[in-house]
Amino acid sequence: MANRADNSIRCSNSKKPNDGMMLVISIFAGVVIGFLLGISFPTLSLTKMNFPSSILPSVATVYIENEKPEKPSKTSSQNEFNSSDASHHHKIWVPSNPRGAEMLPPSFVAAESDFYLRRLWGLPKDDLPVVKPKYLVAFTVSYEQRKNIDSCVKKFSDNFTIVLFHYDGKTSEYDEFEWSKRAIHVSVPKQTKWWYAKRFLHPDIIAPYEYIFIWDEDLGVENFDAEEYIKIVKKHGLEISQPAVESRKSITWKITKRIPGIEVHKEVEEKPGRCNDPHLPPCAGFIEIMAPVFSREAWRCVWHMIQNDLVHGWGLDFALRKCVEPAHEKIGVVDSQWIIHQKIPSLGSQGTAQEGKTAFQGVRERCKREWTMFQKRMTRSEQKYLKEIASASSNATRT
Ligand SMILES: *[C@@H]1O[C@H](CO)[C@@H](O)[C@H](O)[C@H]1NC(C)=O
Ligand SMILES: *[C@@H]1O[C@H](CO)[C@@H](O)[C@H](O)[C@H]1NC(C)=O
Ligand SMILES: *[C@@H]1O[C@H](CO)[C@@H](O)[C@H](O)[C@H]1NC(C)=O
């Protein structure tokens, strides 16, 4: 993952221990710049090199002064010495810490992260705007669709962090758009939306965001405004939602179709035989995967449901209801903010023609196969779990 706006990649390269030449050059450069500007660049490069802290007492003092300017530096450094001394003698082990971090002092553990961009200078506390983005939108994009992506992004205010997953390797081409500077660009060739989501949108990484939009690139957004959408979703208590769809071509699932004149709908009547239970998919508790919106809590569950090898996400929509309770009330479609599905085949053309099938046919076939596999896995896992529960309880009654 790289944000092209900063040079953090170069910085982390210089940390490599075997990069002796780089180290010498950057210390030299640091000394020169420090000399010229009269600021503490050399000591900063030293900390980056992981030198033992014993040779950097002055750095420690400077750092503590910056953090707590109101305290006299002498007492602070003495306290610091005592406390680090104490940790040598009393081993820390906190079982409630995240797995793997049990030996760290709990208030120091940073278990979650974010996509906020920071500066390379100044005080960390002043890096971020007062109002931080609290929603996230991720588009899986190709350069061909840049005009449409530009229109989409403009429907999302500054309250959104923008993530672009590039499946065609073209990232710097987006520089023509002003918003591209504040976007997070992830470029991995020929992967799908759900592949990226599983790998780069872990719930702990995007924990500050209240709502997460994971959208395709071919959606028309003339009748959509993201801030308004969130107001409606909150009002109706929707944990998982999508904007209603207008399409010139036929719509597969009736629930996604826009019903003019209302704010949201949560259930529809389908073709006869499609729904055994009116509260179950595809009649209710159901949205499609082209433009889903998840609450933070719902996403934490859905992320765990995404299988690493089933990259097209087919079948996921039918299982979403397992993540919210009751699903027929918390999953719904927003009619007053709606989108147009342009159905431009995009990823389909990224496959490879083989065995007498076109690239598109090959991708299509895999989608369907994955759907079956997803359903089988889910059913088997549920049966396995229920069997184990049953045998455990029968063991318990036997003894
Ligand atoms: C730190 O150590 C000094 C000397 O051993 C002691 O006088 C002082 O009370 C200690 N301070 C704390 C906060 O433990
Ligand atoms: C961003 O969020 C703040 C706080 O909720 C809100 O006041 C503001 O109107 C939002 N910005 C836009 C462009 O809607
Ligand atoms: C129940 O008992 C059987 C045989 O006594 C044993 O093989 C099985 O592992 C037990 N199951 C559980 C969940 O303890």
Image (tube, rainbow, N blue to C red):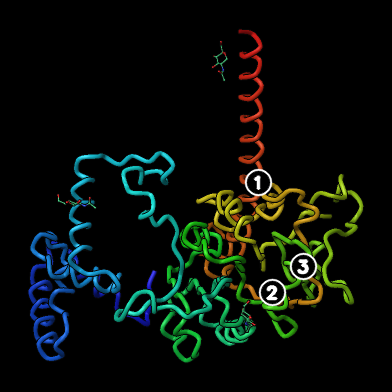
Mark 3 CB near ligand 2 (8 Å cut): no
Q: Residues within 10 Å of mark 2 (few under 14, many from 20)?
A: few
Label 1 SS: helix
Callout 1 amino acid: Thr
* Figure quadrant of the N terminus: bottom left
Kindly identify which residue carries mark 1: 372
Residue 71 relative to residue 245: left or right: left
| Tag 3: amino acid | Lys
Q: Is disc 2's CB within 8 Å of ligand 2?
A: no
> The disc labelled 2 sits on which kind of residue?
Lys
Residue placed most toward the observer, 222 or 113: 113
Q: Verify CB contact (< 8 Å) between mark 1 and mark 2.
A: no
Distance CA(mark 3)–CA(mark 1): 36 Å
Q: Distance between the residues labelled 2 and 3?
A: 30 Å
Disc 1 crowd, CA 10 A, few/some/many (<14, 14-19, 20+): few
- Determine whether the residue tagged by mark 2 lies in a helix, strand or loop: loop
Q: Residue at point 62% right, 71% down?
A: 216
Q: Looking at the image, is mark 1 or mark 2 earlier in the sequence?
A: 2
The residue under the point 61% across, 19% down is 392
The image position of residue 69, as x and y in percent, is: 28, 74
Between 265 and 30, the one lying in front of the other is: 30
Name the residue tied to disc 2: 343
Side (left or right) of 200 relative to 135: left
List the residue tagged with mark 3.
235
Residue 74 versus residue 379 in the image, above or below: below
Q: Position of residue 341 (x, y in %)?
A: 72, 75
Which residue is rendered at x = 60% and y = 82% of the image?
A: 157
Q: In this view, does 104 lie above or below 296?
A: above
Image mark count = 3
